Image (cartoon, rainbow, N blue to C red):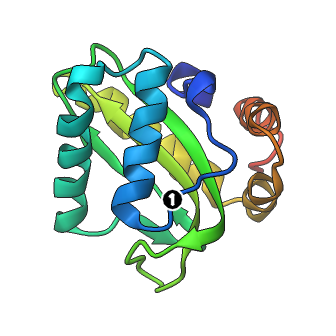
Amino acid sequence: MKFADFICTDAIRCTLASEDKESVIRELVEALVKAGKVSADEHENVVKAIMDREELGSTGIGRGVAVPHTKHASVERLVGTVGISADGVDFDSLDGEKVQLLFLLVSPPDRPGDHLRALENISRQLRDEMFCKFLKQAKSNEDISQLLAEADNNQFVS
């Protein structure tokens, strides 16, 4: 699975305004709503589902990265977005560091394979220091889209 299979480029946010975990999740879900990938009526339910998932254990996986995600019946296919916080957000990460890179995923409950493949792709790509460094330095949504396309073409992971 590639980023192009699930990342909604219209929902990418290169400059997140939010300063805490719930607000940043809310901002990214709102981006998916504005892009037409999540119903406006389901906005709060999706945010709550992601926050419920966070209560099980932080999706802040370390090195400034978090992958908040949930399964939700309101989506027909896996959708995701990327957000960057210049100052970082406290995400209760495993390493205690603030999060700058966020990959948010929402998938239908009946497609667990897609959900796992997307998480696997994200974690594989994020192991590459150069990819993370370039993402954190991205100045526009187009920069992020380009980096994701390069990652899809195996230009980072060796």
Against 61, residue 115 (above or below) is: above
Image location of residue 113, percent across then percent down: 30, 29
Q: Secondary structure at mark 1?
A: loop
Residue type at the position of mark 1: Ser
Is residue 92 shown above or below 9? below
Q: Name the residue at 79% across, 62% down.
A: 133
Residue 2 in view in this figure: no
Q: Residue at x 82, y 38 (%)?
A: 143
Q: Residues within 10 Å of mark 1 (few under 14, many from 20)?
A: some
The answer to whether residue 85 is left or right of residue 25 is right
- Taking 54 as reference, is 78 left or right? right
Q: Position of residue 126 (x, y in %)?
A: 62, 56
139 or 57: nearer the eye? 139
To which quarter of the image does residue 72 belong?
top left
Report x, y in % for residue 42: 21, 26
In the image, is 120 to the left or to the right of 71? right
Residue at 25% across / 61% down in the picture?
54
Outermost residue, front direction? Answer: 17
- Residue where numbered disc 1 is placed: 18
Can I make out residue 97 in this image?
yes
List x then y, in percent, for residue 70.
Answer: 26, 42
Report whether 157 appears left or right of 11. right
Total marks placed: 1
Q: Residue at x 29, y 18 (%)?
A: 39
